[in-house]
Image (cartoon, coloured by chain):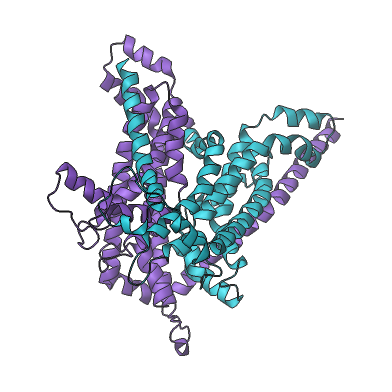
């Protein structure tokens, strides 16, 4: 009994600790600017939409949203497609060099991003890709591709191999087996991986800050980070933008929570 | 005919290997192009004098001069110190707290869905957003943290968190702990759920106390999960950039500037690409060394238990 009670206490603490700052951000984003700098009260008395209105009329916040959707979407699409094929080979096929390839992919995924900023900047400058969409998608592949492959290898290994073997015994070619047996089974894993890759790309900051020059190509995190005016900080608008930037990823992740947790913790369980 | 069959089997194997390489090639080529090739370029760049503000100087080979400058650079040593401080503080707190939460949650029967939600939302939030959120919580007299602390009577006057170089670390570390502890707890919980319950029963029958059970059953079997959490968190903390850039800008002065931010400033503010690249290589080497070290010292048991 008392053991279960300790568990409940921990859960309540966790939920309160995680939840309160979020609650506070949401409440404040609906609070009139003047009240934000008075004595704060935990339960709001006046709620207004001013900050959200200002965000889309004065700030043109839809521009960074569009940029982030294009960049994160393209990165995810490319990685899931190309990385999926690679992950299938690594999870299912027998060939020499598999272990070093897995090692390479894991090693690349721990690269500090800062260690490739200088060459990527020089490369993109030479190709005239600074401040363009491809100029962000290309650098994003450095972290997104190893991540996608690594997650998908985990998902593919969980699929039952018997169906594939049966199909091949029946004379189906490897490619046909992939198309007709593996692909439908893999859709949930591909979806979870796609969401994770999208979240990482949506949230990325260092590359987006380094390789864009102005508001026309800035992504959502860069736009929010540079909101801060020279003399005053428009907290109401910043928090409204924070809510807008977080809502899509939070909802996406919550909708697929079970599979995402599976993908995230697979590495820890297998060691 | 056995000979023919063997040949057929061999050719099937070769076909499988060929297919595997065809499937893997595009992704591997991408990784080589966008990660390994730039990394080599960084090393090359780090051995040259390359200043984008002074293009007339050209790009002459200067060997290890950039590295020598780094060793003598007080701001670099200071940034390295900040990074180490931040890494040790956050990783210790996150692992300790995460382990406690995981052990407690493992005993609870209800609320799994709620836990997952509470864990995933802070993790999924952009770091930029969580940095701003915590800055807002600690900002000025009207910040909720100060208001609560004064109300409760913890302090008489609200401290100014972002001006004093000692205090500023508290909100910075807290923001990181808030964002990642739930995730660490989740990793460790997954490890705990993998432990066979009959082991605890056997220990109880043998009369082992709760502490001894933890020490001799839980801890050794949780080691792989702890190792993974430790590696992920340390490497992540060592690369810290977004949080500090947005929350303090490295200030007041340069008193919270971590190594990634100093490197970024050297590259894109001062446009010193040669020197900045040398700093990048150092960060890379440290991160890689840390990863190898962990696997060497803590991973020895890992391969044994698996093998």
Q: Nearer the viewer, residue B222 or B64?
A: B222
Question: From what the image shows, is residue B148 above or below residue B9?
Answer: below
Q: Is residue B240 among the parts visible in the rendering? A: no
Place of residue B141 in the rendered image (x, y in percent of width and height, measured from the top left): 22, 56
Classify B54 as above or below B173: below
Residue placed furthest toward the top? B205
Residue at 38% across, 43% down: A23
Whole-percent x, y for residue B116 in the image:
46, 34
Residue at horizontal 42 percent and vertical 44 percent from the top: B122
Residue A13: x and y, percent?
32, 33
Total marks in image: 0
Residue at screen point 34% across, 30% down: A12
Residues A140 and A226: in front is A226
The residue positioned farthest toward the left in the image shown: B156
User: On screen, B221 above or below B210?
Assistant: below
Q: Is residue A106 visible?
A: yes
For image coordinates 39% across by 30% down, the residue present is B222
Q: Please provide percent x and percent y for residue B169.
A: 25, 55
* Quadrant of res B219: top left
Viewer-proximal residue among B180 and A159: B180
Q: Locate the N terminus of chain A by quadrant.
A: top left
Chain B colour as displayed: purple
Residue reaching furthest to the right: B1
**Residue furthest front as drawn:** A46
Chain A shown in which color? cyan
């Amino acid at each position: 009994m008392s053991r279960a009670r300790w568990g409940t206490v921990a859960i309540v603490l966790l939920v309160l600790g995680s939840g309160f700052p979020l609650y506070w951000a949401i409440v404040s984003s609906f609070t009139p600017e003047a009240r934000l700098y008075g004595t704060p009260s935990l339960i709001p008395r006046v709620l207004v939409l001013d900050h959200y209105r200002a965000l889309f009329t004065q700030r043109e916040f839809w521009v960074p949203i569009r940029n982030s959707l294009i960049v994160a979407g393209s990165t995810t699409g490319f990685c899931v497609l190309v990385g999926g094929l690679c992950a299938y080979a690594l999870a299912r096929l027998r060939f020499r060099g598999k272990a070093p390839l897995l090692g390479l992919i894991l090693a690349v995924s721990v690269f500090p991003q800062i260690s490739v900023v200088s060459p990527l900047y020089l490369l993109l400058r030479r190709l005239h890709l600074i401040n363009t969409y491809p100029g962000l998608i290309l650098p994003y592949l450095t972290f997104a591709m190893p991540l996608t492959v690594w997650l998908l290898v985990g998902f593919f290994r969980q699929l039952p191999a018997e169906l594939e073997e049966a199909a091949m015994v029946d004379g189906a070619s490897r490619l046909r087996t992939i198309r007709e047996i593996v692909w439908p089974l893999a859709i949930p894993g591909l979806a979870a991986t796609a969401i994770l890759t999208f979240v990482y790309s949506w949230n990325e900051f260092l590359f987006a800050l380094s390789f864009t020059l102005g508001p026309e190509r800035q992504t959502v995190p860069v736009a929010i980070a540079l909101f801060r005016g020279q003399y005053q900080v428009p907290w109401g608008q910043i928090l409204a933008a924070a809510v807008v930037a977080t809502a899509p990823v939070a909802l996406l992740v919550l909708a697929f929570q079970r599979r995402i947790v599976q993908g995230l913790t697979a590495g820890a369980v297998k060691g | 005919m056995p000979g023919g069959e063997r040949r057929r089997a061999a050719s099937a194997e070769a076909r499988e290997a060929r297919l595997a390489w065809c499937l893997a090639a595009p992704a591997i080529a991408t990784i080589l192009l966008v990660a390994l090739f730039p990394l080599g370029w960084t090393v090359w760049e780090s051995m040259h004098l390359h200043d984008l503000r002074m293009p007339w100087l050209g790009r002459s080979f200067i060997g290890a001069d950039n590295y020598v400058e780094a060793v003598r650079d007080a701001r670099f040593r200071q940034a390295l110190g900040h990074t180490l401080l931040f890494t040790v503080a956050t990783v210790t707190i996150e692992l300790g707290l995460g382990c406690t939460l995981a052990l407690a949650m493992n005993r609870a029967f209800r609320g799994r869905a709620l836990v997952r939600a509470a864990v995933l939302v802070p993790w999924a939030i952009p770091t930029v957003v969580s940095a701003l959120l915590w800055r807002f919580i600690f900002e000025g007299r009207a910040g909720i943290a100060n208001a609560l602390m004064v109300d409760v009577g913890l302090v008489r006057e609200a401290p100014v968190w972002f001006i004093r170089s000692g205090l500023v670390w508290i909100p910075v570390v807290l923001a990181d702990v808030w964002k990642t502890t739930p995730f660490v707890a989740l990793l460790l919980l997954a490890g705990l759920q993998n432990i066979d319950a009959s082991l605890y029963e056997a220990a109880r029958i043998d009369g082992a106390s709760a502490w001894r059970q933890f020490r001799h059953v839980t801890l050794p079997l949780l080691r792989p999960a702890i190792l993974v959490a430790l590696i992920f968190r340390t490497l992540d903390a060592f690369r810290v950039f977004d949080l500090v850039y947005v929350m303090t800008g490295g200030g007041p002065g340069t008193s919270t500037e971590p190594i990634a931010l100093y490197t970024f400033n050297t590259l894109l503010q001062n446009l010193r690409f040669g020197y900045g690249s040398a700093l990048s290589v150092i960060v890379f080497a440290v991160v890689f060394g840390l990863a190898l070290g962990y696997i060497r010292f803590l991973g020895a048991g890992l391969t044994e238990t698996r093998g």
